[in-house]
Image (spheres, rainbow, N blue to C red):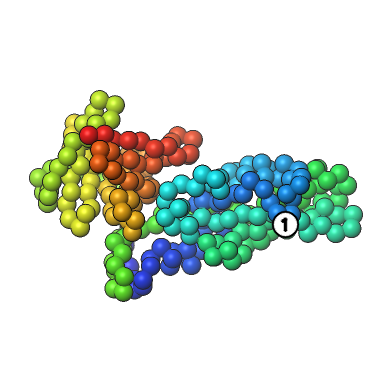
């Protein structure tokens, strides 16, 4: 499906369309919440567990993935505010965007007098109102300032490509004893091809930062978007692992 969009910054437009925390794939959870800086009653851990149950991917504020460093608007930021009143342990879970604007909040309350148990119960009540993560895959696009641009959602691709078509240059990279061909086509875009079966395993599109790329990984389990970067000898991709965490893989000349 193609859509014609006009604008200076497509990624900012994507973030502006997110109206609920469920529209986000990533949630940044701080190590400490301001209102619970002295004693967090294990709320940090409990919030992470609750978000994982809702299928969000948790981001530690001290180890932000490269794609979110490049575009902070890919992630929502979580916070827990203490809104307690007399004889009630009460809190509010808030979610803000990359402009620090709160766009979603959920309240929970408990009559339990013990602080630790009471706040845990209140958090459970608040998070019960949060639906499962339902982020849509972002289309890949080449951005040009001040122009209309066409975006096209990448569909699964299993076909064998002809290695000589539109090839400007080719380099061989190795990983675990296997050879991969880097094939540059046009506009600094390139693909990485498994030399054994001639199948594309990843497609690279230049980001605004030098030597950084938006990457579509071609996988039998389904394609997905990630980030990659290059240097003189390596192509590095952040791959999704079986437990849905992220790990870097390096292809070397």
Q: Quadrant of the N terminus?
A: bottom left
Q: Quadrant of the C terminus?
A: top left
Q: Pick whichever, 232 or 70, lies toward us.
A: 232
Marker count (numbered): 1
Q: Quadrant of residue 78?
A: bottom right
Q: Residue at x 38, y 67 (%)?
A: 9
Name the residue furthest front. Answer: 232
Q: Residue at x 25, y 38 (%)?
A: 233
Residue 105 x %, y %:
66, 61
Q: Residue at x 9, y 45 (%)?
A: 164
Q: Pick whichever, 108 or 175, lies toward us.
A: 175
Q: Callout 1: helix, strand or loop?
A: strand
Q: Is residue 136 visible?
A: no
Label 1 sits on residue: 81
Left or right: where 62 falls relative to 90: left
Name the residue furthest left. Answer: 164
Q: Residue at x 20, y 42 (%)?
A: 182
* As drawn, 245 above or below 5: above
Left or right: where 252 falls relative to 43: left
* As drawn, 64 above or below 6: above
Q: Residues within 10 Å of mark 1 (few under 14, many from 20)?
A: some
Residue 27 x %, y %:
55, 51
Name the residue furthest top. Answer: 177
Q: Is residue 43 visible?
A: yes
Residue 165 x %, y %:
11, 49
């Amino acid at each position: 499906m193609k859509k014609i969009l006009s604008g200076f910054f497509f990624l900012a437009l994507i973030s502006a369309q997110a109206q609920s925390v469920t529209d986000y794939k990533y949630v940044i959870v701080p190590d400490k919440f301001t209102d619970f800086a002295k004693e967090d009653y294990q709320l940090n851990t409990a919030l992470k567990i609750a978000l994982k149950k809702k299928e969000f991917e948790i981001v530690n504020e001290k180890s932000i993935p490269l794609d979110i460093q490049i575009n902070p608007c890919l992630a929502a930021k979580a916070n827990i505010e203490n809104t307690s009143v007399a004889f009630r342990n009460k809190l509010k879970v808030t979610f803000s965007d990359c402009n620090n604007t709160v766009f979603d909040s959920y309240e929970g309350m408990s009559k339990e007098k013990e602080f630790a148990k009471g706040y845990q119960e209140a958090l459970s009540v608040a998070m019960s109102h949060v639906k499962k993560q339902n982020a849509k895959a972002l289309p890949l696009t080449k951005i040009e300032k001040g122009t209309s641009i066409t975006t096209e959602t990448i569909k699964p691709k299993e076909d064998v490509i002809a290695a000589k078509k539109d090839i400007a240059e080719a380099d061989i990279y190795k990983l675990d004893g296997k050879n991969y061909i880097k094939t540059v086509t046009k506009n600094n875009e390139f693909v990485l091809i498994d030399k054994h079966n001639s199948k594309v395993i990843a497609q690279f599109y230049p980001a605004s930062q030098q030597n950084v790329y938006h990457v579509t990984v071609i996988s039998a389990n389904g394609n997905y978007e990630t980030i990659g970067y290059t240097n003189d000898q390596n192509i590095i991709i952040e791959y999704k692992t079986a437990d849905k965490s992220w790990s870097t893989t390096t292809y070397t000349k």
